[in-house]
């Protein structure tokens, strides 16, 4: 199956493709002893492929430790990939030098979970947003001030807050500031890593609505990483479910919530709280924790926790295949060749 097949469908013709990730792998060496002897590797991202179009949000979900944040950082080349290919707006950035990558960095920005630790506490809020404009020499003097004021207004901050420092803002305002900084260079792609997890629920909704408005106005592509399925459902067009470094299910959000195909997705969805005390749902309780990515289980990595696991699951790794139109899953239950042989 080609990597193009992992993209979303668009009845009005193909939108501009912002990101194309093919068989992306990120391993970390495990060192032991005084001399740093190699003692294996952590397979944080293990052969992930997807595409992302302008104006589209791909949600990335999974338990902590499944590799979603590492995938986001590797896509942005904040971490060097071990293998695979990353195309950003058609340019291959997989192994570009820092100097050549600098031009492409304008196109891709990141919003972190904890804006407090990602903002320089010694810089005023105005200087934080102005910094990328100055680094790239885009505007200066009065023009720069006007640009910063416009960005503040666009994300819902007041002009007088330019002279404040990050610690003088609330959590929601700090995240708005991070978003303003990310927007300063007019990127095509924003990777948002748990951008609302640290915020109160009412503020979460405001920030999510802001991100949606900005996407509509600037045709931004978002890779939205979260462990919270309710948040991901609200903002995403398509959702990829990750388990131990691999995408195990990928489809549009309606299909994922209505007819999940992978047992892991079913378990995640059954754990989403329903705001109705009369609602009865059979919760699927997963046994144990996510296995160590240093020594992942053989075959399907989920077999140690899967209620449907059979012998073939312990032996063979299921490929991510298109089970229904634009609905991909990596599970032997949905592979006719394996099911009929079992
Ligand atoms: Fe469960 Fe087997 Fe499917 Fe893996 S391949 S999710 S173990 S049924």
Image (spheres, rainbow, N blue to C red):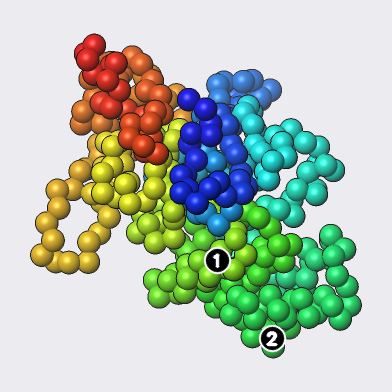
CA–CA distance in space, label 1 to label 2: 24 Å
Disc marking residue 216: 1
Q: In this rendering, is residue 121 above or below 281?
A: below
Q: In this rendering, is residue 6 above or below 164?
A: above
Q: Residue at x 25, y 39 (%)?
A: 286
Please report whichever mark, 1 or 2, sits nearer to the chain's N-terminal start. 2
Secondary element at tag 2? helix
Disc marking residue 159: 2
Q: Residue at x 40, y 75 (%)?
A: 202
Q: Cβ of disc 2 within 8 Å of ligand 1?
A: no
Secondary element at tag 1? helix
Disc marking residue 291: none
Q: Which corner quadrant of the image does residue 322 belong to?
A: top left
Residue 61 appearing in the image:
no
Give how far across and how far down residue 63 sits, in percent.
39, 45
Give how far across and how far down residue 70 sits, in percent.
56, 42
Give how far across and how far down residue 189 sits, in percent.
63, 53
Q: Is residue 212 left or right of residue 120?
A: left
């Amino acid at each position: 199956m080609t990597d193009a097949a992992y993209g979303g469908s668009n009845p009005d013709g193909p939108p501009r493709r912002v990101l194309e990730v093919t068989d992306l792998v990120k391993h970390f060496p495990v060192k032991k002893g005084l001399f740093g002897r190699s003692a294996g590797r952590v397979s944080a991202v293990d052969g992930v492929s997807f595409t992302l179009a302008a104006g589209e949000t791909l949600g990335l979900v999974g338990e902590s430790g499944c590799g979603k944040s590492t995938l986001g950082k590797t896509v942005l080349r904040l971490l060097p990939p071990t293998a695979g290919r990353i195309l950003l707006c058609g340019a291959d950035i997989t192994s570009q030098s820092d100097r050549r990558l600098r031009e492409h960095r304008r196109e891709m920005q990141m919003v972190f979970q904890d804006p407090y630790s990602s903002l320089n506490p010694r810089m005023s809020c105005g200087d934080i947003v102005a910094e990328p404009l100055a680094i790239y020499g885009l505007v200066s003097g009065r023009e720069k001030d006007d640009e910063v004021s416009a960005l503040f207004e666009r994300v819902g901050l007041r002009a007088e807050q330019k002279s404040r420092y990050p610690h003088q803002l609330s959590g929601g305002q700090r995240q708005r500031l991070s978003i303003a900084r990310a927007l300063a260079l007019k990127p095509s792609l924003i990777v948002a890593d748990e951008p609302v997890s640290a915020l109160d629920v009412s503020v979460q909704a405001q920030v999510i609505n802001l991100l949606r408005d900005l996407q509509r106005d600037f045709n931004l592509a978002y890779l939205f990483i979260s462990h919270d399925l309710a948040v991901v459902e609200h903002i995403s067009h398509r959702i990829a479910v990750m388990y131990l470094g691999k995408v195990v299910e990928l489809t549009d959000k309606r299909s994922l919530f209505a007819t999940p195909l992978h047992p892991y997705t079913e378990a995640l969805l059954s754990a989403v709280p329903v705001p109705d005390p009369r609602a009865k749902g059979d919760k699927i309780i997963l046994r144990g924790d996510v296995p160590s990515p240093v020594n992942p289980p053989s075959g399907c990595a989920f077999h140690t926790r899967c209620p449907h696991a059979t012998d073939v699951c312990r032996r063979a790794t299921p490929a991510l295949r298109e089970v229904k139109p634009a609905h991909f899953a990596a599970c032997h239950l949905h592979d006719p060749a394996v099911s009929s042989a079992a």
